[in-house]
Amino acid sequence: MTKNILVTGGAGFIGSNFINYILPKRDDIKIVNLDKLTYAGNLNNLAPVFQNKNYTFVKGDICNTELVDYIFRKYSINYVINFAAESHVDRSILGSEIFFKTNVLGTNILLETSKRYEVEKFIQISTDEVYGSLGPSGKFTENTPLAPNSPYSSSKASADLMALSFHHTYGLPVVVTRCSNNYGPLQFPEKLIPLMIINSMNNKKLPVYGDGLNVRDWIYVLDHNKAVEIVLDSGAPGEVYNIGADQEMKNIEIVNLILKALGKDESLIEYVKDRPGHDRRYAIDSTKTQTELGWKPDYVFEEAIVSTINWYKENQAWWETIISGEYLDYYKKQYKS
Ligand code: NAD
Ligand code: TDX
């Protein structure tokens, strides 16, 4: 049976990696990619599937009820994977409205439409940030109470709870995934890893927030997307699945590793004002996803970070258009010490 999947936000970092990964290897999948093409969306990311007969792109907003309804009808959508979001914490601190519009209202419109068209599965792509911040020990499980701290994470937590309520109340087959920090090719260079790689290559300062000792749990984007594929095929309605690769790193360790790999000097590091409300540590326990769905991460951080750095070295044309634009300037000033 063919799965007609609406992928939202498929021109962004994780969504485009997902489409490029899954389409060429599966005959039973047709994808309609609905993306607004905000500053973070880039159609060039999808060059590998432009010609694929099972791929359709629609430029538009998940908040546009009529458009979303039209897409469900026209393409007989029976699966939804909702990647679309405003995804950057720093931007949410500068202005939260668009985060609640897209991440909450947009998700609501997708859920209402999915209910009307009786979709067979709705996957809400969420984040470990909904659990808040950890002390030096312990990990987030699916039962950890939600305690989001930023406008971004509170908008994602709202969407998670709404999605699960549609399962509880209407029986909509919703599955929520909560993944840790992703890295890999095609990530917009406002996020830590691509920003530090590109700044190092250009001998620009590397802005490290606060003391640089905040911890994130890193996963290669393809490992995340393989988990999403398994959830698509086998995830149980009403369930939440944590996704993570047990790879905790302090921010300063990542920055030093990037400098070393590129043969650059530590003097490029600049400690700047801390991010307001900066979560100290994230760590994901993905035992449930591993034991119940048979997923496990394949990529080793030490190797995948090197191939990621090489990708940015080899794809200068991809990021040059972005950093020559206005995108990076307008908010990076907020942390100047
Ligand atoms: P991204 O910012 O790179 O991409 C987001 C995409 O959504 C862009 O293509 C953008 O154009 C599109 N979009 C934004 N608003 C839209 C709207 N109103 N209608 C239609 N399209 C819209 O984000 P990403 O890093 O690829 O993250 C994808 C999803 O994964 C998000 O839901 C995010 O919360 C979640 N997530 C991200 C990470 C991470 O480390 N990046 C980790 C866990 C979960
Ligand atoms: O310039 C920087 N300097 C710095 O010290 C940037 C951009 C970040 N940082 C720090 C802040 C965080 O502790 O690095 C860490 C990672 O920051 P981000 O890359 O902005 O990611 P984070 O805030 O952890 O959120 C990410 O992971 C979870 C994604 O942006 C979210 O979409 C995802 O849900």
Image: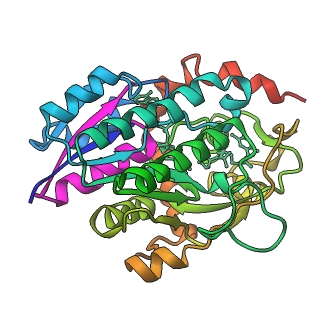
Quarter placement of the C terminus: top right
Q: Does residue 240 appear to the left or right of 196 in the view shown? A: left
- Asked if residue 241 lies in the magenta stretch, the reply is no
Q: Which residues are magenta?
A: 10-36
> Is residue 310 at least partly visible in the picture?
no
Q: Name the residue at 40% across, 75% down.
A: 295
In depth, the one of 184 and 165 nearer the eye is 165
Q: Name the residue at 54% across, 54% down.
A: 182
Q: Report x, y in % for residue 39.
A: 49, 24
Q: Report x, y in % for residue 41.
A: 42, 30
Q: Is residue 127 above or below residue 248?
A: above
Q: Is residue 159 above or below residue 181?
A: above
Q: Quadrant of residue 54?
A: top left
Extreme front residue here? 169
- Asked if residue 17 lies in the magenta stretch, the reply is yes
> Is residue 88 at least partly visible in the picture?
yes
Q: Name the residue at 42% across, 37% down.
A: 12
In depth, the one of 247 and 61 nearer the eye is 61
Quarter placement of the N terminus: bottom left
Q: Quadrant of residue 227?
A: bottom left
Please give the count of numbered marks on the rendered protein: 0
Q: Report x, y in % for residue 139.
A: 70, 71
In depth, the one of 9 and 330 nearer the eye is 9
Q: Name the residue at 25% across, 48% down.
A: 119
Q: How is the image coloured?
A: rainbow
Q: Does residue 206 appear to the left or right of 274 in the view shown? A: left
In depth, the one of 257 and 23 nearer the eye is 23
